[in-house]
Image (cartoon, grey):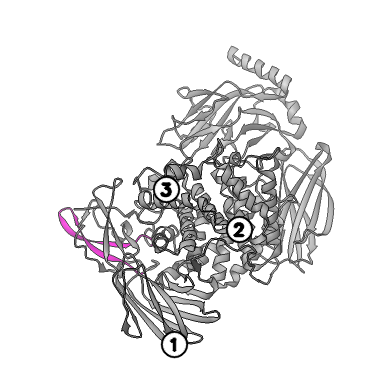
């Protein structure tokens, strides 16, 4: 051994003797080149740069060409650490949290990986993998999301704790969590992986509980825990259709005890909708159509059906619930997804009464409720990490989902669980001694945490408990703390969302939605004014032509609207939250300007973010480039279906008590007039293919009442006739038909869908896009396979010709249009399709086309 390694050995030996651990101090080598051979001991890293062990952080130096950082260090592991290894049979490498994902190698051998930036790394090392008193090579491959990457803690090797050695799980034979389990002989199995190469003795207890947390049975087994995988069986015939099993592991040798939970089945409950106990103080100008009293067909109905069949049916229920049933979850915001699913499924079930969806709802809601701790905590963090990062955010979505379920079903345990969350939040956060600062408990200048103001207003409405309303005002006050986002004051003074807080669009608009709801329950005008300022700023300076906003998840400078795949534009969560905001404002004011924005988003970016063939969702949905659809669990995977399920809330409704037709889609809309007189409106149309609409009016009792018909801003030659008699159409945004209606009366609405040429602005100068009716039309490369890469279109006198025959056999949608273009000095025909339909077969999309 040369003098260098003698010194290293001496340092390691004396350190381990003093502290029973091996700090991996000194320089670490690093590289941004993703070479898999970097894990090998013999790899030559002499040209790599170095950083000290406590400064393993990279920001400005990260290249855009790679999202990987490799770090390496050679270290002598002294045999004196064998004394530590004897404690549990293995050592562990601690690295703290890493941004974002990593893989750990020891002497070229893959040892483990972590796929979350919020989990502290603790990688187990067995004795056989260590070269004692010799040089060992530690290599870590880190994948990051751009902007920054880091290793939180100075790496250290020490004795493993029992929870890092013994990994519990569970399964069952003869049952799954998707079925009721009562009366069935099921073998419930506690599984245990022993990462140490030694055998120990212990006990495993299986406790069985019903949905009310009553213990049904307890079984104790003496067990022998061998190295590797172990299984222990507990046969049981449950009297309850819902069953929670809690396995308790006890190893006296280590003084160690641990738990693992598993849940099965559900109670099939009868639904009786709940009514809020607190009415809105602010006027409700628009009342949404009752979801159970309308059916949407045609183009839009097809997309709603795909959302149910291709997305909700296929949701990973186990993945949504796993982090609640057994903490911690696999990534920091895993807790948001189940609440989003519940709200989506509740709206969809109300609209469809689909029995399979009811089963999903009951099962998911009840298993979530059963995971709540006695103090009300219903998050996905372990004890030491509670109320950090995205914990309040997850509780926000718990409330969203559980309150949606309670409103639909009247199931009291859902309200009880929500109130426990509310009580925990207002006791835990505030300005009193011992309370936490909510701004410090969430990302993006606290806006993630403060967005809980949204469902807390709903909890106040359904419970009537004033403390929840007080908590909402605590949040508005926290905005103006020194460390707060100053949402209201900045919007009042500057009027720009891109200059508010850190300009993070999703979290900011989530707060705006909550503020509108707070205004609705209080009538507090000073809360509403900044929201309207924000809405105006977004619509005039930061809104894409497809009805979304944000690039790289942030509001950008005035009229800066980059739209390529590399610009991370149109985050699905942002699109959905924009829809929510416009829906809330429509409810207050009943103005068509909010319907216009809802329509723009629905017919373009919202629908366009979900593939109707597969149900997969694109996190960012570009105007230029293929839509990157994916089916893995992400925030947008949960948000986009949520937005789509909202659509029936505003396609029709009542404005100042009058039935109003807002979106001209085929289907049935039922509404009460003059008290209990039910009127059925049946619409027949091929819209958005054409503008011929027939609406049959059938009141239960012939009577006089007003019907409002929206006059779309994009419509040409708008005409209305009742029973063949043409009606006067004014310049107003809605047309009032106030008359005596008889069964069988017919309204005929006709309009043209002229093509509007849109300018590319500062982001796409010299380019144009086409809008036909509410739909933006785009070029899909898969539908134009032989066209040259470079072509131009004429902005004037654009003539669209129907060309549906060019669409592939499995294409969802029937609209395709042919238009002339110039390519290579020749006139060519190109095919354009609605943006919402485009890229469903993986085609590159071009929304902004070069003009001649």
Magenta residues span 814-836
Residue appearing at x 60%, y 50% in the figure:
472
- The reply to whether residue 217 is visible in this rendering is yes
Residue at the spot of label 1: 742
Residue 668 placement, left or right of 481: left
The dot on residue 458 is: 2
Question: Please, is residue 374 above or below residue 756 in the view?
Answer: above
Q: Nearer the viewer, residue 1 or 829?
A: 829
Quick one: label 2 or label 3, which is nearer the N terminus?
A: 2
Q: Quadrant of residue 456?
A: bottom right
Query: Label 1, label 3: how many angstroms apart (C-alpha)?
Result: 49 Å
User: Does the magenta portion include 831?
Assistant: yes
Q: CA distance from mark 1 to mark 2?
A: 40 Å
Q: CA distance from mark 2 to mark 3?
A: 27 Å
Residue 338 appearing in the image: no
Answer with mark 1 or mark 2, whichever residue precedes in sequence: 2
Question: Is residue 544 covered in magenta?
Answer: no
Q: Counting other residues with Cα less than 10 Å from the Cα at mark 3, is it few (<14), some (14-19), or many (20 or more)? A: many
Dot 2 lies on which element?
Answer: helix
Left or right of 488 on screen, residue 158: right
Q: Give the percent coordinates (x, y) of residue 768.
A: 26, 54
Left or right of 108? Residue 815 is: left
Coordinates of residue 556 in the picture (x, y in percent): 39, 43
Q: Nearer the viewer, residue 364 or 603?
A: 603
In-front residue for pair 425/522: 522
Label 1 element class? loop
**Which label belongs to residue 550?**
3
Q: Is residue 17 left or right of residue 444?
A: right
Q: Secondary structure at mark 3?
A: loop
């Amino acid at each position: 051994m040369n003098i260098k390694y003698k010194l290293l050995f001496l340092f390691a030996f004396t350190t381990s003797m003093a502290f029973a651990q091996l700090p991996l101090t000194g320089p670490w080598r690093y590289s941004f080149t993703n070479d898999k051979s970097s894990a090998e001991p013999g790899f030559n890293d002499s040209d790599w740069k170095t950083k000290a062990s406590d400064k393993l952080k990279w920001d400005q130096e990260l290249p855009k060409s790679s999202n990987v950082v490799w770090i390496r260090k050679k270290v002598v592991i002294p045999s004196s650490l064998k004394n530590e290894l004897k404690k549990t049979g293995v050592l562990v490498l601690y690295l703290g949290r890493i941004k974002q994902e990593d893989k750990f190698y020891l002497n070229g051998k893959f040892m483990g990986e972590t796929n979350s930036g919020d989990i502290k790394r603790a990688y187990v090392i067995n004795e056989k993998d260590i070269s004692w008193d010799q040089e060992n090579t530690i290599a870590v491959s880190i994948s990051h999301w751009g902007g920054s990457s880091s290793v939180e803690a100075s790496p250290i090797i020490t004795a493993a704790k029992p929870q890092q050695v013994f990994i519990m799980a569970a399964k069952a034979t003869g049952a799954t969590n998707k079925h009721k389990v009562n009366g069935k002989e099921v073998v419930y199995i506690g599984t245990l992986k022993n990462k140490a190469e030694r055998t120990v003795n212990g006990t495993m207890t299986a406790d069985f509980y019903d949905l009310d947390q009553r213990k049904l049975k307890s079984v104790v087994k003496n067990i022998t825990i061998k190295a590797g995988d172990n299984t222990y069986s507990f046969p049981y015939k449950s009297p309850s259709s819902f069953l929670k099993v809690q396995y308790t592991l006890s190893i006296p040798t280590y003084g160690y005890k641990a738990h693992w939970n598993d849940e099965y089945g559900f109670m099939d409950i009868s639904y009786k909708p709940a009514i809020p106990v607190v009415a809105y103080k602010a006027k409700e100008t628009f009342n949404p159509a009752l979801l159970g009293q309308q059916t949407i067909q045609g183009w839009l109905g097809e997309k709603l059906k795909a959302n149910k069949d291709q997305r909700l049916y296929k949701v990973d229920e186990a993945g949504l619930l796993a982090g609640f049933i057994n903490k911690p979850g696999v990534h920091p915001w895993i807790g948001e997804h189940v609440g989003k699913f519940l709200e989506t499924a509740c709206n969809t079930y109300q609209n469809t009464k689909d029995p399979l969806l009811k089963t999903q709802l009951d099962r998911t809601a009840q298993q979530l409720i059963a995971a709540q701790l006695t103090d009300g905590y219903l998050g996905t963090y372990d004890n030491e990490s509670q109320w950090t990062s995205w914990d309040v955010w997850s509780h926000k979505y718990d409330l969203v989902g559980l309150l949606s379920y309670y409103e639909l079903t009247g199931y009291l345990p859902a309200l009880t669980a929500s109130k426990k969350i509310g009580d925990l939040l207002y006791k835990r956060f505030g300005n009193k001694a011992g309370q936490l600062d909510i701004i410090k408990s969430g990302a993006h200048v606290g806006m993630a945490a403060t967005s809980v103001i949204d469902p807390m207003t709903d909890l106040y409405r359904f419970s009537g408990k004033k403390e929840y309303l007080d908590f909402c005002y605590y949040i508005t006050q926290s905005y103006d703390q020194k460390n707060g986002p100053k949402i209201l004051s900045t919007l009042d003074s500057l009027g720009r969302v891109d200059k508010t807080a850190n300009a993070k669009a999703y979290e900011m608009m989530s707060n705006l939605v909550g503020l509108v709801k707070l205004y609705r329950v209080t009538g507090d005008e000073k809360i509403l004014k900044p929201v309207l300022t924000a809405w105006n700023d977004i619509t005039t300076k930061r809104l894409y032509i497809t009805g979304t906003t944000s690039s790289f998840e942030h509001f950008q400078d005035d009229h800066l609207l980059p739209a390529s795949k590399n610009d991370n534009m149109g985050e699905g969560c942002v699109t959905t939250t924009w829809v929510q905001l416009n829906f809330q404002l429509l409810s207050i004011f009943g103005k068509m300007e909010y319907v216009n924005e809802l329509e723009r988003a629905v017919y373009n970016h919202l629908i366009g973010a979900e593939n109707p063939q597969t149900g997969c969702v694109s996190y960012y949905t570009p105007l230029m480039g293929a839509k990157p659809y994916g089916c893995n669990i992400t925030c947008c995977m949960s948000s986009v279906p949520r937005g789509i399920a909202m659509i029936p809330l505003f396609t029709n409704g009542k404005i100042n008590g009058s039935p109003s037709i807002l979106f001209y889609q085929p289907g049935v809309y039922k509404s009460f007039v003059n008290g209990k007189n039910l009127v059925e409106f049946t619409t027949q149309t091929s819209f958005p293919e054409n503008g011929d609409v027939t609406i049959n009016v059938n009141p239960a009792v012939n009577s006089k009442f007003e019907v409002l018909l929206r006059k779309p801003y994009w419509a040409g030659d708008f005409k209305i006739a009742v029973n063949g008699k043409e009606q006067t159409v004014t310049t107003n945004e809605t047309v009032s038909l106030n008359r005596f209606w008889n069964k069988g009366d017919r309204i005929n609405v006709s309009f043209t869908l002229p093509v509007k040429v849109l300018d590319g602005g500062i982001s796409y100068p010299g380019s144009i896009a086409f809008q036909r009716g509410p739909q933006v039309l785009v070029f899909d490369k898969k539908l134009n396979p032989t066209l040259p890469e470079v072509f131009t279109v004429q902005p004037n006198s654009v003539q669209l010709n129907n060309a549906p025959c060019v669409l592939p056999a499995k294409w969802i949608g029937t609209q395709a249009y042919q238009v002339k273009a110039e390519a290579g000095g020749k006139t060519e025909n190109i095919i354009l399709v609605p943006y919402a339909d485009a890229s469903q077969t993986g085609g590159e999309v071009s929304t902004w086309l070069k003009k001649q």
